[in-house]
Image: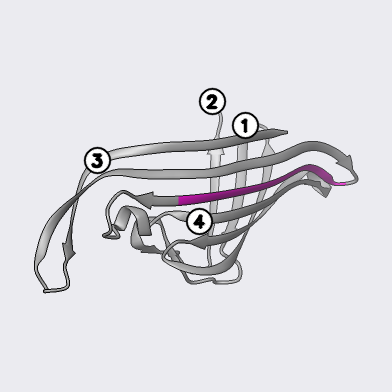
Amino acid sequence: MSLQLTSRVVRGGNHSFAIDSAGNASAENITDVDVRGIDCSYSMQLELGPLAFLRIGLMYQDVRASARATTAYVADNLRTQGILETRWVLPFDIRAAYIARAVERVTKPTVYVVHDIRLMRSFGSVTITAEATNLTDQRFIETGWVVVPPRWARLGAAVTL
């Protein structure tokens, strides 16, 4: 089990503007961004039939700037994330992984659940992988103001020399 408490101050040269009651804009430098939070997870190797691994995690962040203006850096941060990860050994030596992430961002305080699955099978030095991401086709803004991609899948092969 790992438990980690975090607190940090980020210094940077972000610039924004504050507007007073008369409508006058003045530059307001944001010199401090304070990020406080908790990141904890519990993981264990299992031998419960095909279930081989379990991880449960929770992360919470509180992000505040020293200035009155809200910047993209502050608004863009993750607020809360919960993770459930399982790994399985299926018949025919197929390895599987399932991850569910419950995500809440500062930009929109709504919880979204994203489900991912991966199947892998090795044949000597070749490993075939099939992945499906965002199975329930959730739509929300991820970090960097980027929309999470819709449901998608990948198929690949890796060769070990």
Which residue in the rendered view is the most extreme toward the right?
Answer: 49
Q: In this view, does 61 lie above or below 3?
A: below
The residue located at (30%, 58%) in the rendering is 72
Q: Residues within 10 Å of mark 1 (few under 14, many from 20)?
A: few
Q: What residue type is labelled 3?
A: Gly
Indicate the secondary structure of the residue bearing disc 1.
loop
Task: Give the percent coordinates (x, y) of residue 154.
Answer: 53, 56
Task: Give the percent coordinates (x, y) of residue 124.
Answer: 67, 32
Front label number (4 vs 1) = 4
The residue range painted magenta reads 50-62
Which residue was labeled with disc 4? Answer: 79
Task: Tell me which numbered mark, 2 or 1, is placed earlier along the sequence.
Answer: 1
Proximity of marks 2 and 1: CB atoms separated by less than 8 Å: yes
Q: Is residue 153 above or below residue 9?
A: below
Q: Which amino acid does label 4 sit on?
A: Arg
Which residue was labeled with disc 3? Answer: 12
Indicate the secondary structure of the residue bearing disc 4.
strand
Which residue in the rendered view is the most extreme toward the top?
Answer: 161
Q: Rounded to the nearest whole Å, what is the CA distance between mark 3 and mark 1?
A: 48 Å
Which residue in the rendered view is the most extreme toward the front?
Answer: 21
Q: Rounded to the nearest whole Å, what is the CA distance between mark 4 and mark 1?
A: 42 Å
Q: Please state if 59 lies on the left or on the right of 12 as rendered.
A: right
Task: Give yes or no for residue 132 being in the magenta stretch.
Answer: no
Task: Give the percent coordinates (x, y) of residue 84.
Answer: 69, 52
Task: Tell me which numbered mark, 2 or 3, is placed earlier along the sequence.
Answer: 3
